[in-house]
Image (cartoon, rainbow, N blue to C red):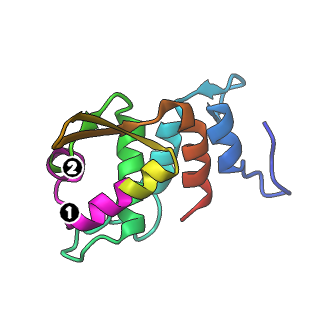
């Protein structure tokens, strides 16, 4: 395993790319990179989740929450209303902020949209971009 300096710390980006977790045994554990990312985020000081303290979630927070949700639920597809109700429950996010985040993520090609009818559009993960998304989430805070 590659180490940084004398600190013995393994760069998160290396862990994300390889899907390996440092282990006390001689055999490294193979772990879903998404699990590693979420464990590191849950342990970050002051991490209370976006928009959960009554404050409106920012565009960046909403985009990040969407990507984390989709990495956990890679086959999920839903409408804007479904995303508000099921993917971001308890998050203080306005419909306009969510729609803007979805448009930006579609522009980046991280989320795909599928028009089912004139008024029904489903959004879901572009699975071909998972490693790019993980890299972005690992390097941006």
Please report the residue visible at 29 percent of the width from the left and 70 percent of the height from the top: 57
Residue 93 seen: no
Return the x and y of residue 40 as percentages of the image width and height.
51, 52
Proximity of marks 1 and 2: CB atoms separated by less than 8 Å: yes
Residue 115 in view? yes
- Asked if the stretch drawn in magenta spans residue 66, the answer is no
Main secondary-structure element of the magenta-colored stretch: helix
Q: Residues within 10 Å of mark 1 (few under 14, many from 20)?
A: few
* Image quadrant where residue 111 sits: top left
Residue 85: give x, y in percent of width and height. Answer: 14, 49
- Residue at 43% of width from left, 48% of height from top? 106
| Mark 2 nearby-residue class (10 Å; few <14, some 14–19, many ≥20) | some
**Dividing the image into 4 quarters, which one contains the C terminus?**
bottom right
Residue placed at 49% from the left, 31% from the top? Answer: 127
Is-magenta flag for residue 94?
A: yes
Circle on res. 95: 1
Q: Which labelled disc corresponds to residue 80?
A: 2
Magenta extent: 82-102
**For this view, does 133 lie left or right of residue 15?**
left
- Where is residue 64? Give x, y as percent: 42, 57
Q: Could you say whether the residue bearing mark 2 is in a helix, strand or loop?
A: helix
């Amino acid at each position: 395993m590659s180490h940084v300096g004398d600190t013995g710390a393994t760069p998160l980006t290396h862990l994300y790319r390889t899907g390996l977790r440092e282990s006390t045994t001689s055999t490294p554990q193979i772990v879903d990179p998404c699990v590693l990312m979420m464990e590191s985020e849950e342990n970050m000081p002051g991490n209370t989740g976006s928009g959960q303290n009554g404050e409106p979630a920012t565009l960046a927070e909403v985009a990040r929450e969407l990507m984390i949700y989709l990495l956990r639920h890679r086959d999920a597809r839903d409408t804007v209303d479904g995303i508000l109700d099921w993917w971001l429950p308890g998050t203080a996010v306005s419909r306009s902020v969510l729609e803007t985040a979805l448009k930006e993520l579609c522009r980046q090609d991280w989320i795909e949209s599928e028009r089912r009818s004139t008024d029904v559009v489903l959004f879901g993960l572009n699975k071909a971009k998972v490693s790019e998304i993980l890299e972005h989430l690992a390097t941006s805070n």
